[in-house]
Image: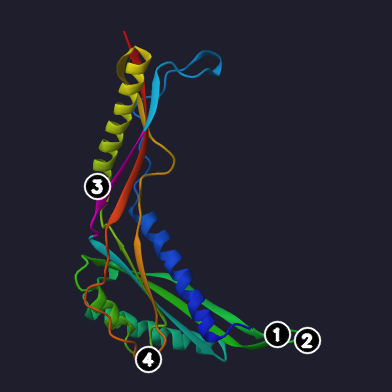
Amino acid sequence: MLTFFQKTVLGTIGLAAVLVALVLAAKAPAQATTIAPALPAPGGAIPAGIVTTGDAIVRVKPDAAVVGVGAIVQGSTAAQAQDLLAQRIDALLQKAKALGIADADTKTAIYRIDPQYAYEQGKAPRLTGFQGTQQLVLTLHGTDGVGRALDTLVQGDNAATATVTFTLFDPKAVQATARAQAIGDARSKAEAMAKTAGVALGKVVSVSDVGLAPTVDTTTYSQLVKSAAPAALPPQLPMGELQVMVRVQVQFEIGG
């Protein structure tokens, strides 16, 4: 049977994965639409023209942070676990409001009430109680004072886990810059191919993102709250730079 500390560690790892998924799902725009369909070729042959891919990476400082705080409680009954969990989450929500975090920027990522069992060889599992888990996701506009905000949230015995993911609040402008650079990269490759082949490079036939929509990586800082009075965090956590990555495929005609 896992100890409470082991479960808390697993909860922290799970929260980090949930937060990254939430950030990417919330921030990544829909896949770009092809400007025009590729020219059809008889019998499924390779389309006429020059087809290249272009890549671009734009590095930028994050301008937002997603803070995750979670509570884990133990109760002898499901109702007791629910009540204890509600008390701790309410205390965290009050702290979030005191920090100026709006209700629209506050969401619940995980809520669980799980029965707990003791296992002994040769015997049926024995119910020992219930564990309640809830994770809040708080979006901070700007990155100044993220450490101070996290420190405020984890003080006391209400939070069991804490995670910060630095990201971009609106990545569209940076993604547009990266896409323009990627198209330029694809054109440079096509020009080199055309020159080597002894032909002229014609107009663009189609442009599309390759694979998934352009992605923004994230920088995550996690803290396991091991006591009721964890060490104070610095007002500003190291956040580094984010990478906005785009890959496109461009098809050109062969000029006359």
Q: What numbered label is drawn on residue 123?
A: 2
Determine crowd level at label 4: few under 14, some 14-19, many 20+ residues with C-alpha closer than 10 A.
few
Nearer to us: label 3 or label 2: 3
Element class at badge 2: loop
- Disc 1 marks a residue whose amino acid type is Tyr
- Disc 3 marks a residue whose amino acid type is Val
In the image, residue 29 sits, relative to residue 23, either above or below, namely above
Asked if the residues shown at circle 3 and circle 4 are in contact, with their CB atoms under 8 angstroms apart, the answer is no
Name the N-terminal-most of marks 4 and 2: 2
Considering depth in this image, is 250 or 153 the residue closer to the camera?
250
Element class at badge 4: loop
Asked if the residues shown at circle 1 and circle 3 are in contact, with their CB atoms under 8 angstroms apart, the answer is no
**Is 228 displayed left or right of 42 in the figure?**
left
Residue at x 49% of width, y 78% of height = 9
**Tag 3 residue:** 174
| Residue 158 spot, x, y in % from top left | 38, 86
Considering depth in this image, is 184 or 118 the residue closer to the camera?
184
Name the N-terminal-most of marks 4 and 1: 1
Q: Quadrant of residue 200?
A: top left
**Is 235 displayed left or right of 122 in the figure?**
left
Q: Quadrant of residue 33?
A: top left
In the image, residue 65 sits, relative to residue 7, either above or below, namely above
Residue furthest to the front in view is 196
Residue at x 22% of width, y 73% of height = 236
Determine crowd level at label 2: few under 14, some 14-19, many 20+ residues with C-alpha closer than 10 A.
few
Residues in magenta?
54-62
**Tag 4 residue:** 228
Cα–Cα gap, marks 4 and 2: 37 Å
Identify the main secondary structure in magenta.
strand
Judge whether residue 58 is colored magenta.
yes
Cα–Cα gap, marks 1 and 3: 53 Å
- Disc 4 marks a residue whose amino acid type is Ala
